[in-house]
Structure formats: C-alpha cells, structure tokens
Image: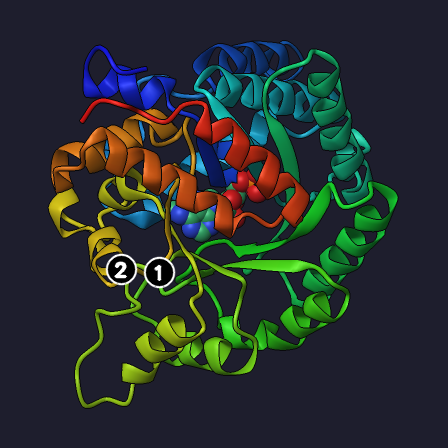
C-alpha cells in the first residue's frame, strides 16, 4: 500500500462509510439501468443526464435531484438492484464497513410498503454477503423531516422490529430530509423513543443555521452521531448558542463530515474552510463520509484524498483517521475489534 500517489493510497486503504443515503449513492450504470427499465412502462420518466449536482446553486436543487431518483426507485426490484449496486461499489472502493441509510417508503401504485422496502434492502445485504464481498453492512432507517411525527414513530417501531428480527443488522435510525422544512425539535419524543428501544440515532443537525432547533435537540435528546453539523460552531456570539458547541464537545458526539457534498450544496465555500478541520483540531471525533457517491460524484477514497491535499495529511495521518472512525460505528464492540485487526494489516510503514 506504500507506493504510488495519494489517490492510490486512499483507494487501497481500508475505510468506513457512515453517512450514505441509498438513493443518492447510485453508480451511473445502475441508475441508467433503472431509468431504462422504468421508461418502458412510464413514458414520463426520464432523468436529464446532463443534470448534475455541480449545476446546483443551493441545497434546494439537490432535493430536486432526489425527486428524480425516487421516480425510478419506487418498486421492489429497483430497491433491490440499487442496494446490491451500492454495496458492490463501496466494496470496490475498499470500504470494509458500511452503514447504509434509507427512508422506508409506502408507494401504493407499485405495492411497496415500508416493511417490504426494508425487507428488500435486507435481501440485497444478504445476497451481497453470499457473494463474499469483503464488507460488513448495517442499516439505518431514515426519518424524513418533511413527513409527520406519526410517520417518524412508525419508522422507529419498524427499526425496533427489524433490529430484533435481524439480530442487530438494522442498528438504528437516521433523521434527515430538507433541513429548511419544519422543526427538528418536534421529533424529540421520537428520538427518545428510539433510544429507549435500544436503537442508535444519527441525526442531521445544523446543516443550516437553525440554532434553536439544534440546541433543543442537543439538550433533550442528543444523538449518537451528527450528520454534517455544518453550523454547529458558526453561531453569532452572545446569542446564547455557545452551548451547542459545549454539548457536542462534552458529550463527544462524533460528526459525519461530508466535504464535497457541503461544497456542492454551497453550505461551505472551499475545502480549506470545511468544519472538518475545526473539530479535528480539537481532537473531536470526526468521520470522513460521502453523503451520496452518485449525486455528489465522489467516493470515500476521493474524500480522504481531498482531506490529505487540503490539510496536508501524511499516509499515517490518513490511516489513523480511518482507524479512529471505527470508534464511531454503531455495530457492537466485537465488530469493532475485528475491523481494527484488519486495519493493522494495512498500516503504512513509509512516511
Ligand atoms: C438532508 C438528505 C441529504 O432515504 O431515499 N437526504 N437529508 N440533507 C442532505 N444533504 C444535502 N441528502 C439526502 O435517500 C434520499 C433521501 O435522503 C435524505 C433526503 O430525505 C432524501 O430524500 P433515501 O434512500
């Protein structure tokens, strides 16, 4: 693993992915196949291939891209194909442990139910296991904040049911969706219910400067990991929001840093100013993730390479960063220990 460029090193290095939404992680081959398949029965379905997230002017535009993808991933076969395609792609990028998240969907026109959605993803995970891919996969069920608190609670109940049924393969919940919509604080009882059921909670928080909801969630139902956290430390002094940073630091809540995603959705201007560095300098747990390899046209390896170039990381620094992310996974200690052994074998002996 010692020879070659930073890119080659980052590719060969074993890695963890903790922030990946199923429907934004397509590879172009699978997406094309899914579009072609759907357009045979529905002539209205087409994805503007020239449209890329690079054209986005703001976060709203990426939510429009998600709608296009959801048009073609609306039945059992599509969810299955996408799940398998996504897991294979991460495995090919030498990701050894993946927590894949997705919003279970109820789509009467195709017979899709929330429960079938999760079962289908699980079938994809098991079939990949049978292929002996060198990757461990766990699932998080996502709550879309654009939906009601009742639907959110249904998702938690579903996660509990599948956690028991799968012996922990469904390991927790994610809270996501358009951060401009609604108030995260309304979902606090749902987060508490998830915790009570022994589910882990990863929550998109402070993706936009919504300090009141951020503070309320951190005070009353602090998550086990924070997605993005872009504005956690970007508050105006004197407004009473300093506590946000204090809680995150004191409780050592790991942050899932998705650098390219944040640049492309324009909440961060350049890699150098990404909040990854703010938390890293404080020795706070921060994990390099993609958010969506398809929509943001990146890989976990590329994200590590961006970090290496921007923050001047040596190969050993990168390896330690990747190793440290094992501490932040939701799977049990036995899985963490197995992964740590795998990492030792890949330790870079050159500078
Ligand atoms: C908030 C996001 C997101 O669940 O259909 N999602 N939520 N912020 C983001 N960053 C820009 N990126 C994706 O995957 C797509 C869904 O994930 C959430 C949104 O709810 C989106 O509809 P699934 O697999």
The tally of labels here is 2
> Residue, x 67% and y 30% (percent of image)?
74
Is 310 above or below relative to 150?
Answer: above
* Mark 2 residue element: helix
Can residue 155 be seen? yes
Describe residue 76's horizontal placement relative to residue 89 as left or right. Answer: right
- Measured from the top left, where is residue 115 in percent x and y? 81, 42
Q: Is residue 44 visible?
A: no
- Which residue is the site of mark 2? 279
Residue in front for this viewpoint, 164 or 348 = 348
Q: Nearer the viewer, residue 90 or 56?
A: 90
Q: Nearer the viewer, residue 283 or 150?
A: 283
Residue 310 sits in quarter: top left
Q: Residue at x 23, y 11 (%)?
A: 3
Mark 1 crowd level (few <14, some 14–19, many ≥20, 10 Å Cα): many
- Cβ atoms at labels 1 and 2 below 8 Å apart: yes
In space, the residues marked 1 and 2 are separated at their CA atoms by 10 Å
Q: Position of residue 118 (x, y in %)?
A: 75, 38
Q: Is mark 1 within 8 Å of ligand 1?
A: no
Left/right placement of residue 37 relative to residue 322 reads right
Residue indicated by mark 1:
229
Q: Residue furthest right?
A: 165
Considering only order in the chain, which callout, 2 or 1, is on the residue closer to the N terminus?
A: 1
Residue 181, position in %: x, y? 45, 63
- The spot of residue 291 in percent (x, y) is 42, 40
Question: What number is the disc on residue 9?
Answer: none
Name the quarter where the N terminus is drawn.
Answer: top left
User: Is 344 drawn above or below residue 115 in the view shown?
Assistant: above
Tag in front: 1 or 2: 2
């Amino acid at each position: 693993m010692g020879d070659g460029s930073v890119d080659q090193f980052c590719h060969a290095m074993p890695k963890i992915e903790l922030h990946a939404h199923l429907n934004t992680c397509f590879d172009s081959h699978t997406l094309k196949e899914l579009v072609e398949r759907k357009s045979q029965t529905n002539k209205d379905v087409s994805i503007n291939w020239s449209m890329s997230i690079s054209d986005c002017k703001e976060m709203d535009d990426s939510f429009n891209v998600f709608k296009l993808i959801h048009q073609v991933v609306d039945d059992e076969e599509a969810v299955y194909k996408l799940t398998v395609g996504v897991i294979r792609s991460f495995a090919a990028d030498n990701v050894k442990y993946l927590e894949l998240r997705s919003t279970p969907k109820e789509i009467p026109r195709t017979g899709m139910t929330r429960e079938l959605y999760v079962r289908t993803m699980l079938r994809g995970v098991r079939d990949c296991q049978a292929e002996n891919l060198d990757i461990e996969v766990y699932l998080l069920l996502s709550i879309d904040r654009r939906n009601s608190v009742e639907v959110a609670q249904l998702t938690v109940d579903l996660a509990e049911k599948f956690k028991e049924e799968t012996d922990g393969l469904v390991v927790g919940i994610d809270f996501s969706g358009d951060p401009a919509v609604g108030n995260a604080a309304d979902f606090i009882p749902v987060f508490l219910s998830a915790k009570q059921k022994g589910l882990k909670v990863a929550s998109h928080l402070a993706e936009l400067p919504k300090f009141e909801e951020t503070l309320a969630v951190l005070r009353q139902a602090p998550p086990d990991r924070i997605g993005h956290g872009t504005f956690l430390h970007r508050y105006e002094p004197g407004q009473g929001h300093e506590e946000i940073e204090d809680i995150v630091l004191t409780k050592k809540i790991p942050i899932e840093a998705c650098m390219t995603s944040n640049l492309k959705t324009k909440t961060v201007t350049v890699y150098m100013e990404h909040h990854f560095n703010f938390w890293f300098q404080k020795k706070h747990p921060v994990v390099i993730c993609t958010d969506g390899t398809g929509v943001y046209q990146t890989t976990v390896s590329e994200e590590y390479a961006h970090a290496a170039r921007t923050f001047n990381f040596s190969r050993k620094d990168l390896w330690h960063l990747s190793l440290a992310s094992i501490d932040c996974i939701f799977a049990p200690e036995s899985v963490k220990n197995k992964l740590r052994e795998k990492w030792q074998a890949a330790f870079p002996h050159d500078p």
